[in-house]
Image (tube, rainbow, N blue to C red):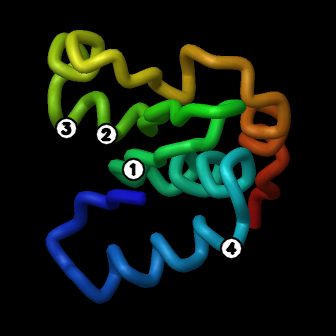
Amino acid sequence: MTIVDPSNARADAWATAMTVLGEQEGMALARRHDLAVLMLVRQGDGWQSLASPAFAEYFGRAMVDKLGIEVAEDVDNGPVAADEGSEQEN
């Protein structure tokens, strides 16, 4: 897990929360809060690099694509899409 943030303490706190939540719920959290996140996710016998849209924007979509990193908005994460629309207005 890599989180780009000016505050090391805040990045560490977000990383802890996302690690506890897991891949889908953690990435949903990153998308809701516009966090620049890169996750390494186990896929069978290998690993997949999965970035939040904010991470792709921060480093540039061309660079992310060149490195073969998938962006969460480009993959079907099931609960990510459903979770984003569930926020309530105060």
Q: Position of residue 61 (x, y in %)?
A: 24, 17
Mark 1 or 2 closer to N-term?
1
Which structural element holds mark 1? strand
* Among numbered discs 3 and 1, the one appearing first in the sequence: 1
Residue neighbourhood size for the residue with mark 2, other residues' Cα within 10 Å, grouped as few (<14), some (14–19), many (≥20)? many
Mark 2–mark 3 CB contact (< 8 Å): yes
Disc 1 to disc 2: CB gap under 8 Å = yes
The structure residue drawn at horizontal position 53% and vertical position 78%, both measured from the top left corner, is: 16
Q: Type of residue at label 2?
A: Phe
Instruction: Decide which of tag 4 and tag 1 comes sooner along the chain.
Output: 4
Mark 1 = which residue?
37
- The image quadrant that residue 72 belongs to is top right
The residues tagged by marks 1 and 2 sit, at their Cα atoms, a distance apart of 5 Å
Q: What separation in Å lies between label 4 and label 1 (alpha carbons)?
A: 15 Å
Residue 19 position within the rendered picture, expressed as x and y whole percent measured from the top left: 60, 68
Measure the alpha-carbon separation of dots 4 and 3. 25 Å
- Residue at (65%, 47%) from the top-left corner? 28
Dot 2: element: helix
Q: Which mark is residue 20?
A: 4
Q: Quadrant of the N terminus?
A: bottom left
